[in-house]
Amino acid sequence: MKETVDSRQINAFVALARCGSFTLAAKELFLTQSAVSHAIKALEDDLGCRLVDRLGRRVRLTPKGEQFLKHAEGILRQMKSARGELETLSKWEHHRLRIGACTVSCRHLLPWVLQSFRSSYPRCIVGIEVGSQAVHLERLRAHQVDLALLLEPLGSPVPEIEFVPLFEDEMRLIVTPGHPWAEMDAAPHGTFERETLILFSKKSYTFQLLSDYLKDEGATIGNIIELGNMDAVKELVKLGLGVGLLASWMVRSELADGTLVSLPFGARKLRRQWSIAYWRGRQLDLLETTFVDLCQTASRNLIEPELRAAS
């Protein structure tokens, strides 16, 4: 007996069992009666047993035939399912995916995600819209993007938007090794407002979190330099022109080589929640689910060094 069975023979056997005659099975399969008879004979020879009893123009399954029918029907169902999945993959490869993201995620998260996604769906068109959290929330509401990588609003629920958590980070003060704060655990109370704060954008959600944090602490913000570029923020901090506001994973190489020092704000941490968002109630398709899974994997890889350092 062969280890494998010809799928055409299986198909002929199932059709014969269903129809009860070689004539009807041949008609259903668009084959000649002799072709069906030959397929059944070859199948019986391969299996080494009789599967059907021929009773005139009708056929009846033998006990072994009834047992084999259960497996044969299962095989055909699996083949049909496999074909359907391949057709689905082929279908989605020709679709497009619209992603909203900020400049930070475009640099640190999306390159690996897009490379991995492209290997699975090489013909899918992926469009990236760059913007702030507020912009992407509006784009989701207007159905202008399918998914958005953004900071999840804390304490301000957005009922029509679903958020899938990616990772949490901590915003910290970034200074040069020669800064007076460099040897301290945090900025001394009452001195923050006398410093120049170098940041990405006053319109960002991070700045809103900072403002709320300082308000709760009874502190104020002094002079601000707004650059709109994370690399420029780091370079000005290195020159000693002010204090930066960045997460540790954004300055990992600078912290490692000692050109910058990271400090907490105080006893209470300034945390942010990164998430991937989509319109609530909408069922994600295969493309979108794959993209979300890849973002979660990329997020774990991104913050793993910080998690190891904290443990």
Image: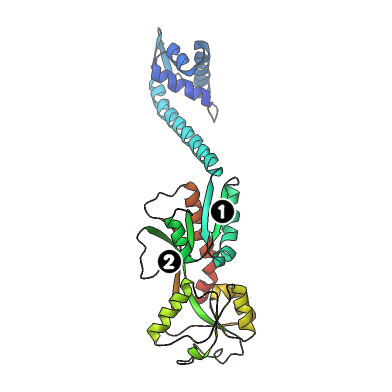
Please tell me how crowded label 2 is: few (under 14), some (14-19), or many (20+) other residues with Cα within 10 Å: many
Q: Earlier in the sequence, mark 2 or mark 1?
A: 1
Alpha-carbon distance for marks 2 and 1? 22 Å
User: Can you identify the residue that label 2 sits on?
Assistant: 152
Q: How many marks?
A: 2
Please tell me how crowded label 1 is: few (under 14), some (14-19), or many (20+) other residues with Cα within 10 Å: few
Where residue 59 appears, x then y in whole percent?
40, 13
Q: Residue at image x 52%, y 43%?
A: 92
Q: Residue at image x 39%, y 70%?
A: 154
Quick check: can you spot residue 259?
no
Nearer-the-camera pick, 311 or 226: 226
Q: Residue at image x 36%, y 52%?
A: 281
- On screen, residue 185 above or below 78: below
Q: Which residue lies furthest to the top in this view?
A: 56
Where residue 129 appears, x then y in whole percent?
54, 58
Quarter-of-image position of residue 24: top left
Quick check: can you spot residue 120?
yes
**Amino acid under disc 2:** Glu
Q: Residue at image x 51%, y 54%?
A: 291
Nearer-the-camera pick, 2 or 169: 169
Where residue 123 appears, x then y in whole percent?
60, 45
User: Can you identify the residue that label 1 sits on?
Assistant: 127
Instruction: Indicate the secondary structure of the residue bearing disc 1.
Output: strand
Where residue 241 appears, x then y in whole percent?
61, 86
On screen, residue 255 versus residue 207, left or right, reads right
On screen, residue 16 versus residue 120, left or right, reads left
- Of tags 2 and 1, the one toward the viewer is 1
